[in-house]
Amino acid sequence: MKKHLYTLGLAAAFLSACSSSQTPSASTAGGAANSSSTAANPTQYANTITAADLEKHLRILASDSLEGRETGERGQKMAAEYIANHFKANGIAGPVKTGSNPYYQPFDLEKSSWGEGYVTVGSKRFTMGKDFFVLGASPYQNEEAVQVVFAGYGIDEPAYSDYTNLDVTGKAVVVLAGEPKKADGNYLLSGTDKMSTWSQDARTKAAAATKKGAKSVLVVMGTTDAEFQQMTGRYAGMLSRPSIGFGTSATQPRAANIYISPSMAAALLNTKPEQLATYGASVAKAGKAVASPYKVATNVKIKTARNRQPLPTENVLGYVEGTDLKDQLIVISAHYDHEGIKDGQIYNGANDDGSGTVAVMELAQAFSEAKKNGHGPRRSILFLAVTAEEKGLLGSEYYTENPVFPLANTVANLNIDMIGRSDKQHEGKPDYIYVIGSDKLSSELHAISENANKTYANLDLDYTYNDPNDPNRFYYRSDHYNFAKHGIPIAFYFNGVHDDYHQPTDDVDKINFPSAEKVTRLVFYTAWDLANRQERIKVDSNKK
């Protein structure tokens, strides 16, 4: 359905729409599991989360007047103010001590588009968009001579490191994609047929290179140039479109993440493309990282010009302080940004992730209501609406790199992204939710989630996408992952994709609010247990 822009009283639409707290309904259900601080009935507060309130908020946040909530643009700012006003109206504190607004965690992103881009190796010239692609920012605004070094697979772990005795400070590091295998075909790191994060998350190698002081990491993709083009084809269309990222600065340097073709890699390493595979064979034979067999090129220059402009944005934070265990923290999150306007059509993002955002708002109101009645949580709870998820989980990355509360005190993250719809696998059976990651770091969190569902919600908990071999890789694709990579247990609530995913047709009228209500209440009961139990849940596993 084609959409048009409306101006229809923008300020009035969102400034006056904040709700006041509801009066909780009575119930006779039992108290929170393992809670020794309160005999409160959690159902009394869970029942304040209603389909009607979820719909009321979503009809504001996913309306045309908010213009698709594009990161850094007017609609995103309006959404941020609406969420903050809701927190304030319900007596939920803003925990940010710096800046003018205690509900905002502001930070600067960078909006940029590519200019001229090339790499020369002696007389050979390689072109951006054909021979290589840059993901995110790049420090090579002007042509710059670089020193190249080969670092195997670019892995850095205590038991296996490609950086041992290797100085990469300020250099361009060439690494192979994926991870090494043993002679028996199993992965060397896991000892099984299960690949690790080094294969699954492209940012891991860039982060390792950054930590070692590299200026860029050049990842060799594919075994032939044709395979490289096939694997990176989706990036070609992005070259002409502006992108949003953190940028690179002297105070926060990031190694440029560059995907390169086998031919370009061979030129940089003074070898032939077909010889690149011999390194993996050598590692498999040795069962460990081996020294570089390549004599790298010495006359290498890079230019990847960017046209840049600053783009301020903000996470929105609400805080309910705990009682006797208040220094420990539960984080409940969702992203409130979406795709904005494309080709004159508004991408309202009702499901993605307006639905999760309004769930967080209702959860905050429910816990605030409990606190007003003298039944506040023992542990504190942070309600975190993050920006720039659609740009690469940037808002949650910023929070976890610049936490308002210490990550060491953060017990768990419950993340909600897309609820209240059904995918093709659950047509006609709306009482379900995919739960992803609940057992990855803590068996206790998984048990708490299961118990909360069995006791109160009775939803079909579908673990299809929790499979580490699932090709969709949803575990790595929403904001919980930035907590998980810091060793914080997470649970991700998700209804699956549908035909309106990332389309202008993702509208409010397609949301099943009774279903969203049930999922939100499940999150409430899980959070209630986490916040009130005597012992903090343990991190007792490290599944991928």
Image (cartoon, rainbow, N blue to C red):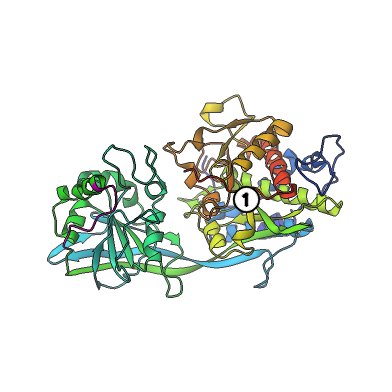
Magenta range is: 286-295
Q: Residue at x 76, y 60 (%)?
A: 88
Horizontal and vertical percent position of residue 259: 30, 55
Vertical placement of residue 165 versus 428, above or below: below
Q: Residue at x 29, y 62 (%)?
A: 173
Label the magenta part by its dominant secondary structure.
Answer: loop
Instruction: Say what amino acid the circle numbered 1 marks.
Output: Ala
Going by the picture, which residue comes out furthest to the bottom?
A: 250
Quadrant location of residue 207?
A: bottom left
Quadrant location of residue 405?
A: bottom right
Name the residue beneath numbered marker 1.
412
Local SS, label 1: strand
Q: Residue at x 58, y 61 (%)?
A: 74
In the displayed structure image, the side of residue 161 where residue 38 appears, left or right: right
Nearest the eye: 159 or 333: 159
Vertical placement of residue 428 versus 111, above or below: above
Horizontal and vertical percent position of residue 215: 33, 68
In the displayed structure image, the side of residue 74 where residue 291 appears, left or right: left
Task: Inspect the magenta stretch and tell me whether residue 17 lies in it.
Answer: no
In the displayed structure image, the side of residue 122 where residue 133 appears, left or right: right
Quadrant location of residue 156?
A: bottom left
Vertical placement of residue 306 versus 359, above or below: below
Horizontal and vertical percent position of residue 140: 31, 70
Q: Residue at x 55, y 57 (%)?
A: 396
Task: Inspect the magenta stretch and tell me whether residue 287 lies in it.
Answer: yes
Nearest the eye: 212 or 418: 212
Residue 499 visible to an observer of this rendering = no
Nearest the eye: 514 or 169: 169
Circle 1 crowding by C-alpha within 10 Å: few under 14, some 14–19, many from 20: many
